Amino acid sequence: MCHLVLLMPFIGPTVFWISPMSIAVPIYLVILASPLWLYWYVIKSMRWPVQTGKEKICRGIATVISVEGSRLTESMNGEIWNAESRDRLELNDKVGVFDIRGLLLKVRRIRNTT
């Protein structure tokens, strides 16, 4: 069914064989506009940033909830993760995730610009 919608601009000219020009042109414009509208939404959705998986986690910001040396526990998007950092962190510090290895996140302290 989807392929028919995408092929409508090529199938549409048949309306010129069965209808007079004054009726066929508006009908064909509607037939042409509908797949163009669909193409626009498809291209727009392909440009959205990734919103799931490793790519989203690696761009995330988390809050430190437990510190044990370089190992820590953090909360990100309502989930609790084990993490590791080279920075010296304290409770409630904000950290940015830059890598993920299995279920262990590699994080860095976020510097305050204020």
Image: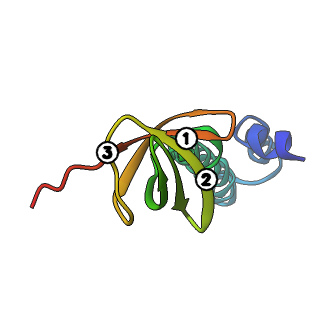
- For marks 1 and 3, give the CA distance: 16 Å
* Disc marking residue 33: none
Give the quarter of the image for residue 87. top left
Where in the figure is residue 18, as x and y percent of width and height? 83, 49
Identify whether 8 is placed above or below 20.
above
Q: Earlier in the sequence, mark 2 or mark 3?
A: 2
Q: What's the residue type where badge 1 is placed? A: Leu
* Disc marking residue 105: 1
Where in the figure is residue 12, as x and y percent of width and height? 75, 43
- For marks 1 and 2, give the CA distance: 7 Å
Residue placed under numbered mark 3 in the picture: 88
Q: Nearer the viewer, mark 1 or mark 3?
A: 3
Q: Nearer the viewer, residue 60 or 6?
A: 60
Q: Earlier in the sequence, mark 1 or mark 3?
A: 3
Residue contact at pointers 1 and 2, CB within 8 angstroms? yes
Q: What's the residue type where badge 3 is placed? A: Arg
Q: Secondary structure at mark 1?
A: strand
In this rendering, would 58 be left or right of 54? Answer: left
Q: Nearer the viewer, residue 67 or 16?
A: 67
Q: Nearer the viewer, residue 93 or 70?
A: 70
Residue placed under numbered mark 2 in the picture: 81
Instruction: Determine the residue positioned at 37% across, 51% down.
Output: 95
Q: What's the residue type where badge 2 is placed? A: Trp
Q: Earlier in the sequence, mark 1 or mark 2?
A: 2
* Mark 1 nearby-residue class (10 Å; few <14, some 14–19, many ≥20): many
* Mark 2 nearby-residue class (10 Å; few <14, some 14–19, many ≥20): some
